[in-house]
Image (cartoon, helix red, strand yellow):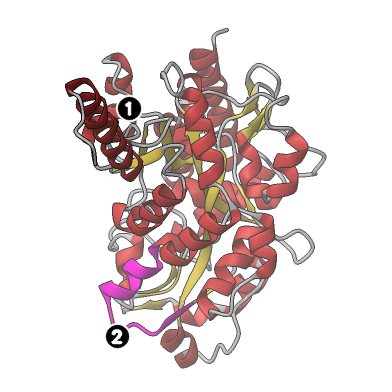
């Protein structure tokens, strides 16, 4: 090589340096030249009530798949505090971009969420994708959330207690239930309950009282509320074309199980909490959500139990109460468009299917429910999810207080069921006026 001039040597050094920098940039080694963390859209913060352990591996793979677009960071929140924390975070401008929660929370926080308009996400697409249990999210202003999972109510039953009572089959209707289960309630000489058929009739030691009553009302043909374009309307006191008002008939049916003077007396408030009574082997049946299966299994490894669909009013129109877990975009956040893209990706068939297999809860997609499962327990959960229904519970703590008062009025003899329902209807109408205005 001939001797280079100082100028030529300088040019050569600059060229080699630029070439080396280009290689380092391409390799992503130089920190100052890497792509922004979370892809071009950055990080999307998601709060939710599902266990972090259930989402960890899914989100790792999900973020790898979408690394050039965005990444989702998940923060688990206990269901008892998520709404309080969410309101505080909104006030301090540190709210998450996505909210993953049961439908009651989505409905309660609907004014702080972004409804996806019909021209962005057509209602026909929603209806074709999700089962009935998810359709509560489809509102006139748009789609409040994308359903991910369904947590339906099922009937847990103690196999040993049924076998000992000579009951080989599970009653499919409430008429069969009352006719077949009398031997399952055991009393001592003073008529104290030693063994209960089922925890129904009261509210103080029945944790899912409101959900059970809602299920019975929906089965009886009363949707509890009618949704108009602007506000809900109470239907509790409506006859809805029936000879007897459905809600009053349901209240009378429910309360009989806690009335010592009735032949189906099986429960009172001196007994342990409903789920605890079942796990101890002191109750033959227990109505509860599918999500409690693992908890019940762990509470008593010696308990021989199984699950079935809850009894129905009749075999023609089957339904059960279900809780739908959905994913919403939070209002007034800087990454709304990115959050919506992430939500759509998380609601894909593959991701929901994987999430369902980890949580053991049915997927909130009609195509996945149609495929079904070979697991005998999850088969019942899937069947329950398909017939799952819910209602527009816009103020859960306050509606629960109304339901409790309605039950207590009958149990204490203050009011007959017809008048107790009428009073509850008035209270529900007052609550609607308080929340939505006169």
Q: Could you tell me which secondary element the residue under label 1 belongs to? A: helix
Q: Looking at the image, is 229 positioned above or below residue 313?
A: above
Q: Is residue 245 visible?
A: no
Which of 155/70 is in front? 70
Q: Quadrant of the C terminus?
A: top right
Q: Is residue 430 visible?
A: yes
At x 53% / y 72%, what residue is drawn? 378
258 or 432: nearer the eye? 432
Does residue 335 appear to the left or right of 389 in the view shown? left
Q: What residue is pinned by disc 2?
A: 302
Which percent across, then down, holds residue 411? 44, 47
Q: Secondary structure at mark 2?
A: loop
> Which residues, given as a range, are shown in magenta?
292-306
Residue 245 position, x and y percent, is 71, 41
N-terminal-most mark, 2 or 1: 1
In this picture, residue 133 sits left or right of residue 414: right
Quarter assignment of residue 308: bottom right
Residue drawn at the location 55% of the way across and 67% of the way down:
381
Q: Position of residue 211 (x, y in %)?
A: 50, 48
Q: Report how far apart the C-alphas of labels 2 and 1 lie in the structure.
A: 41 Å
Residue most extreme to the front: 2
Q: Residue 132 in the image: x percent, y percent?
A: 68, 48
Q: Quickly name the residue at label 1.
A: 86
């Amino acid at each position: 090589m001939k001797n280079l001039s100082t100028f030529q040597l300088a040019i050569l050094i600059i060229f080699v340096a630029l070439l080396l920098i280009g290689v380092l940039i391409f390799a992503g080694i130089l920190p100052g030249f890497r792509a922004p963390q979370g892809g071009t859209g950055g990080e999307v913060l998601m709060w939710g009530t599902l266990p972090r352990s259930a989402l960890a591996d899914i989100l790792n793979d999900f973020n790898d798949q979408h690394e050039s677009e965005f990444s989702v960071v998940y923060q688990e929140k206990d269901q008892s505090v998520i709404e309080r924390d969410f309101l505080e975070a909104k006030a301090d401008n540190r709210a998450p971009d996505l909210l993953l929660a049961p439908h009651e929370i989505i409905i309660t926080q609907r004014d702080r969420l972004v409804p996806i308009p019909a021209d962005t996400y057509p209602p026909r697409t929603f209806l074709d994708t999700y089962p009935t249990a998810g359709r509560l999210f489809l509102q006139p202003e748009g789609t409040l959330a994308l359903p991910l999972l369904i947590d339906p109510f099922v009937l847990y039953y103690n196999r040993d207690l049924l076998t000992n009572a000579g009951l080989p089959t599970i009653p499919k209707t409430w008429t069969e239930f009352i006719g077949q289960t009398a031997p399952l309630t055991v009393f001592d000489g003073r008529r104290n309950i030693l063994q209960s058929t089922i925890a129904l009739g009261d509210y103080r030691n029945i944790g899912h009282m409101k959900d059970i009553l809602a299920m019975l009302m929906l089965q009886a043909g009363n949707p509890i509320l009618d949704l108009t374009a602007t506000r809900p309307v109470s239907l509790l006191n409506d006859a809805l074309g029936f000879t007897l008002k459905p809600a009053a008939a349901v209240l009378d049916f429910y309360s009989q199980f806690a009335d010592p003077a009735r032949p189906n007396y099986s429960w009172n408030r001196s007994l342990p909490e409903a789920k605890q009574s079942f796990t101890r082997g002191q109750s033959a049946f227990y109505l509860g959500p599918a999500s409690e299966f693992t908890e019940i299994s762990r509470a008593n490894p010696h308990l021989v139990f199984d699950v079935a669909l809850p009894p129905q009013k009749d075999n023609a129109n089957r339904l059960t109460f279900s809780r739908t877990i959905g994913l919403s975009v939070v209002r007034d956040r800087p990454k709304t468009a990115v959050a919506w893209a992430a939500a759509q990706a998380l609601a894909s068939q593959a991701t929901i299917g994987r999430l369902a297999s980890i949580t053991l809860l049915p997927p909130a997609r009609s195509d996945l429910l149609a495929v079904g499962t070979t697991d005998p327990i999850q088969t019942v959960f899937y069947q329950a999810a398909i017939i799952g229904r819910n209602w527009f519970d816009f103020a859960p703590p306050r509606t629960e207080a109304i339901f409790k008062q309605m039950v207590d009025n009958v149990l204490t003899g203050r009011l007959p069921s017809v008048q107790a329902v009428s009073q509850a209807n008035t209270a529900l109408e007052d609550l609607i006026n308080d929340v939505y205005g006169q």
